[in-house]
Image (tube, rainbow, N blue to C red):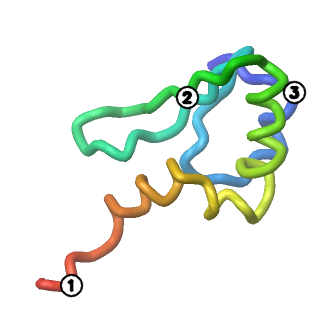
Amino acid sequence: MPNSYLAPGVICPFYRYDLNNQIVCESPADQALSCATNFASARDAREFILDYCSTGCHQGCPLYRAIMLKYEEDPQE
C-alpha cells in the first residue's frame, strides 16, 4: 500500500495507509474492510497524522472511537 514518509511513526492500530490528502483506516462497520477520510489538502492530512495517528492522542480521533465500539463487549451479555 502507498504511504507517506510519516507512516513509520504511526502508532494507531487502526491506521492502514495514507496517500496525498487521504488517510485509510480500519472501518467501524463490520461489513467493510476500510474507511477513507479525505482531507481538503495533503497538508491537512499530514497534520492529522501528526496530531492523532502518530501520538498517544489517537484515542481522541473520532474514527478511532467509532472503531473501538466494534470491539467493546456488550454489557447485556
Marks 3/1 in contact by CB < 8 Å: the verdict is no
Q: Residue at x 48, y 59 (%)?
A: 65
Q: Residue at x 21, y 77 (%)?
A: 74
**Residue type highlighted by circle 3:** Tyr
Query: Which of label 2 and label 3 is nearer to you?
Result: 2
**Residue type highlighted by circle 2:** Thr
Task: State how far apart marks 2 and 3 are (Cα).
Answer: 18 Å
Dot 2 surroundings within 10 Å: few (below 14), some, or many (20 or more)?
few
Give percent across and percent down for residue 26.
46, 40
Dot 1 surroundings within 10 Å: few (below 14), some, or many (20 or more)?
few
**Residue 50 sits in which quadrant?**
top right
Q: Secondary structure at mark 2?
A: strand
Q: Secondary structure at mark 3?
A: loop
* Disc 3: which residue: 5
Give percent across and percent down for residue 37.
55, 29
Give percent across and percent down for residue 11.
72, 53
**Residue type highlighted by circle 1:** Pro
Task: State how far apart marks 3 and 1 are (Cα).
Answer: 41 Å
Give percent across and percent down for residue 3.
73, 23
Q: Which mark is residue 75?
A: 1
Q: Residue at x 62, y 29 (%)?
A: 23
* Disc 2: which residue: 37
Task: State how far apart marks 2 and 1 are (Cα).
Answer: 30 Å
